[in-house]
């Protein structure tokens, strides 16, 4: 079964925020970001080397906690693994926001509805890639089928955190050099 997800090349990411701002321009509103850059410091960067960066959005989990928490059934998975919110069904209760262990869902103050990365679903239907992938000047982001065996060697980076094992996020990392565990826990 197909499960689309993001592959983040941490060794390439410059932290330039092109993915963040392109996503906001395409989908956002004042004060909102569906995608965020995280900067982390490891032992090497403490010695004067640069910080490491990685880009995060909704992980389109195989077992989404947000979907299980939604009393209206407004959150559904498409056959390709993309998790979408049906704005017409969303009551704005915020249970999905609370349930998401990745802090990927926010309530839109303009619509009072849940909002998150939809992996540019409409763009994909038109045969285009996501806006964040197309905006990255160094190709640090890719969309992959995480169930394809050729991607099995990439790091999950969150293995061991119980809620994450339950949700099984559809994100993989290439050449992660630091322990980013603390970014996954709220």
Image: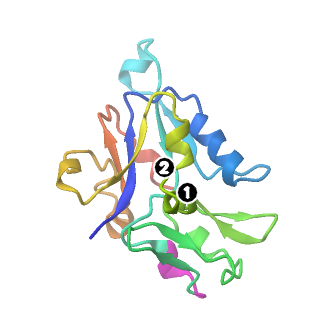
Q: For residue 123, which numbered disc appears in the image?
A: 1
Q: Please give the range of residues in magenta.
A: 66-72
58 lies above or below 24 = below
Residue 130 image point, x, y percent: 52, 50
Q: Is residue 104 magenta?
A: no
Q: Which sits in the foreground, 172 or 42?
A: 172
Residue in the picture at 62% in, 77% down: 86
Residue in the picture at 79% in, 63% down: 109
Residue 167 image point, x, y percent: 38, 68
Quadrant of the frame with the N terminus: bottom left
Density class for disc 1 (Cα within 10 Å; few <14, some 14-19, many ≥20) is: few
Secondary structure under tag 2 reads: loop
Residue 118 image point, x, y percent: 55, 62
117 lies above or below 151 = below
Task: Please identify the quarter of the rendering in which residue 145 is found.
Answer: bottom left
* Mark 1 touches mark 2? (CB < 8 Å): yes
Secondary structure under tag 1 reads: helix
Task: Please identify the quarter of the rendering in which residue 11 is found.
Answer: top left
Left or right: 47, with 118 as reference point = left
117 lies above or below 75 = above
Q: For residue 129, which numbered disc appears in the image?
A: 2
Q: Disc 1 to disc 2, how far (Cα)?
A: 6 Å
Q: Earlier in the sequence, mark 1 or mark 2?
A: 1
């Amino acid at each position: 079964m197909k499960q689309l997800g993001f592959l983040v090349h941490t060794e390439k990411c410059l932290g330039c925020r092109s993915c963040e701002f392109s996503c906001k321009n395409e989908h956002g509103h004042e004060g909102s970001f569906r995608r965020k850059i995280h900067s982390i410091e490891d032992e090497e960067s403490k010695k004067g080397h640069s910080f490491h960066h990685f880009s995060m959005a909704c992980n389109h989990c195989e077992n989404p906690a947000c979907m299980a928490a939604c009393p209206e059934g407004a959150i559904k998975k498409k056959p390709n693994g993309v998790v979408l919110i049906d704005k017409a069904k969303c009551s704005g209760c915020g249970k999905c926001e609370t349930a998401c262990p990745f802090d990927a869902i926010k309530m839109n103050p303009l619509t009072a509805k849940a909002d998150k990365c939809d992996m540019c679903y409409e763009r994909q239907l038109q045969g285009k890639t996501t806006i964040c992938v197309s905006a990255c000047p160094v190709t640090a982001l890719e969309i992959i089928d995480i169930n394809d065996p050729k991607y099995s060697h990439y790091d999950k980076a969150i293995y061991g955190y119980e809620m994450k094992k339950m949700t099984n996020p559809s994100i993989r990392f290439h050449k992660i050099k630091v322990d980013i565990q603390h970014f996954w826990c709220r």
